[in-house]
Image (tube, helix red, strand yellow):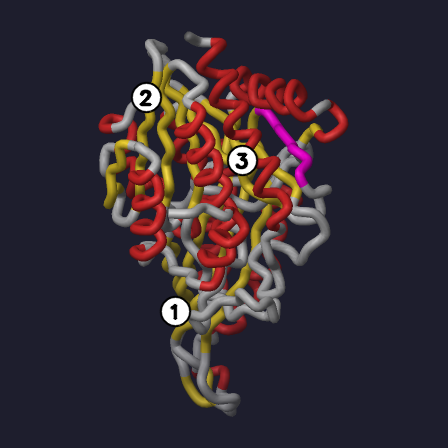
Amino acid sequence: MSFDPVAIRRKLHAAPELSREEHATSAFVAELLEGWGYDVARGVGGTGVVATLRNGAGERIIGLRADMDALPITEATGAPYASAHPGVMHACGHDGHTTILLAAAKELAETRDFSGTVRLVFQPAEEVGGAVEMLADGLFERFPVDVIFAMHNWPNIPAGEFRFLAGPTMASVDLVIITITGQGGHGARPHETVDPIVAASSLVLALQTIVSRNVDPLETAVITVGMIHGGTLPNVIPDKVELQITTRAFTDAVRDRVRARIKVLAEAHAASYGATADVFHPPGFPALVNHDAETAFARQVAVRHFGEDVVGTAPLRTGSEDFAFMLQKKVGSYLFVGNGPSADLHSPRYDFNDAIIAPASRYWVALVKDYLAANS
């Protein structure tokens, strides 16, 4: 099968699949890898693909991960290769990440200029925690690695430039669902009710004091009330109001502190109005913490092969990334490649820059060769 990276990326872009539904994408990826001589396992963690290539006598194993899923967004780019699936779009560049790793895979298979083992992880459902599902399916027990790396494009960094950051790099994210229950009634007789809307409104303002008064000013936390549902008519006070909140932090201590204070404030504010509050914390994503030595090595590879003028330090990002779960199990690093001027990630106008496929895939090849050579 011929392989044109730009054509492949646009093919993937036009046929996006949502998290846990990447059946055609994973089958396509697996078919290419098998054709290049990889030992391919399908269906890992649902629709995940793990490909292995061994060469020489080296004992070290390097893992590279790319994500494959799209988002429930209606595309507005107007591109000739725009999504053919209404309401589904590659608005984060996972089509590009998959293509970059495929291009690197082809080069590694053709040249085999390394001694050791390369493990390629094509992950489904990054947007909703697919890393957890791959790990639960025995990812690192079935397919051991000594180190693992991943890469994400980033808008408005010069195209093809690389950014690295050791330590906390992307924030944890947690969903908090609060249900405030009062006693509904007619809007003309509020004194006969316990109004959960008033209690919820008071709570929204009180939550903002957690960051300003309960978190060390030298630390970072974000609390966003993104959704409030309550009531159906302007003259009827409802029985219940639901708030949905996301919280973000870079350390476990701050993460736990924020969640604990939300529960205290929710219950206290509801009680002060005669209502009750039920607080639910479903599992979230931890902060992504890059390992120092592996990040330094990854940066050195970029400097060695591309020059210092296209290598820099990434800022802390309050977005989240489920590769954090993999970095809790194995040493490694998550790096960024510039996408050039573009709309932001998750925008219906975002599009991946095909010009960065070549340098990014060359980087993966260089990282593999240098890591296995250094540890052979």
Question: Is residue 349 shown above or below 319?
Answer: below
Distance from label 1 to label 2 (Cα)? Answer: 60 Å
Distance from label 2 to label 3 (Cα)? Answer: 19 Å
Q: Is residue 177 visible?
A: yes
- Which badge, 3 or 1, comes first in the chain's sequence? 1
Q: Is residue 256 visible?
A: no
Q: Which residue is mark 2?
A: 54
Q: Amino acid at mark 2?
A: Arg
Position of residue 319 measured from the top left corner of the image (x, y, whole percent): 56, 46
Position of residue 334 measured from the top left corner of the image (x, y, whole percent): 52, 32
Q: Identify the residue at horizontal 57%, vertical 42% (top origin).
A: 357
Q: Which mark is residue 361?
A: 3
Q: Is residue 305 magenta?
A: no
Distance from label 3 to label 1 (Cα)? Answer: 54 Å
Q: Identify the residue at horizontal 49%, vertical 82% (top origin).
A: 191
Residues in magenta, as a range: 160-166
Q: Are marks 3 and 1 in contact (CB under 8 Å)?
A: no
Q: Amino acid at mark 1?
A: Thr
